[in-house]
Image (cartoon, grey):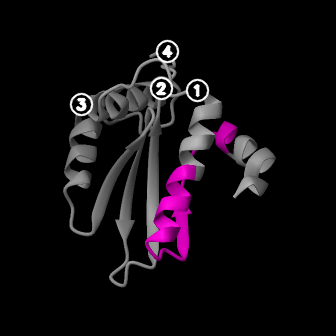
Amino acid sequence: MAIVKSKDKKVPTAEVITNALADMKRDNLLPENMPLQAIILSIIQECHMPDTSTVQLGNTVFISHFSKDRKEIAVRAFNIDTPRNYLDNSIQFTKQVMKFGVERLTSDFADSRIAQLLDRKSTRL
């Protein structure tokens, strides 16, 4: 799917996740032997797990899994926004969770472009 600039159009949460997963599947960033529909269903299930939060900022959806004391979170981001907006959404999300007492945030990703983006802009936090 094409990037959708959130300043022009905000896409519904389910559509962001579905389209981001379709892009990841196309780019071979998901298991080859799993159908896209099965992956989408597993993400829907993940959103309803205990101690899990789903937040959308712009056209980026953050799924967070909280530790029992809520001081640590593991985050997955699904994005169809522009690179600039993705970075801004990520910074805004990080600031929000820090206000709620989160002291440690971890995230795994397979797309090397994310590391490059964060490397250049990490000082803005």
Residue identified by numbered label 1: 82
Image-based side of 61 in relation to 53, left or right: right
In this rendering, the count of numbered labels is 4
Look at the picture and state if 105 lies above or below 54: below
Q: Residue at x 74, y 53 (%)?
A: 124
Report helix, strand or loop for mark 4.
loop
Residue identified by numbered label 2: 6
Q: Quadrant of residue 13?
A: top left
Residue identified by numbered label 4: 2
Report helix, strand or loop for mark 1.
loop
Report helix, strand or loop for mark 2.
loop
* Number of the front mark, 1 or 4: 1
Q: Quadrant of residue 60?
A: top left
Marks 2 and 1, the one that precedes in the sequence: 2
Quarter of the image with the N terminus in it: top left
Question: As drawn, which residue projects farthest toward the bottom?
Answer: 69
Measure how far apart labels 4 and 3 are at the Cα level. 20 Å
Residue identified by numbered label 3: 37
* Number of the front mark, 3 or 2: 2
- Classify mark 1: residues with Cα within 10 Å, few (<14), some (14-19) or many (20+): some
Specify whether residue 107 is in view.
no
Measure how far apart labels 3 and 1 are at the Cα level. 25 Å
Q: Are marks 2 and 1 in contact (CB under 8 Å)?
A: yes
Q: Is residue 51 magenta?
A: no
* Number of the front mark, 4 or 3: 4
Specify whether residue 113 is in view.
yes
Amino acid type of the residue tagged 4 in the rendering = Ala
Q: Which residues are magenta?
A: 92-114
- Classify mark 2: residues with Cα within 10 Å, few (<14), some (14-19) or many (20+): some
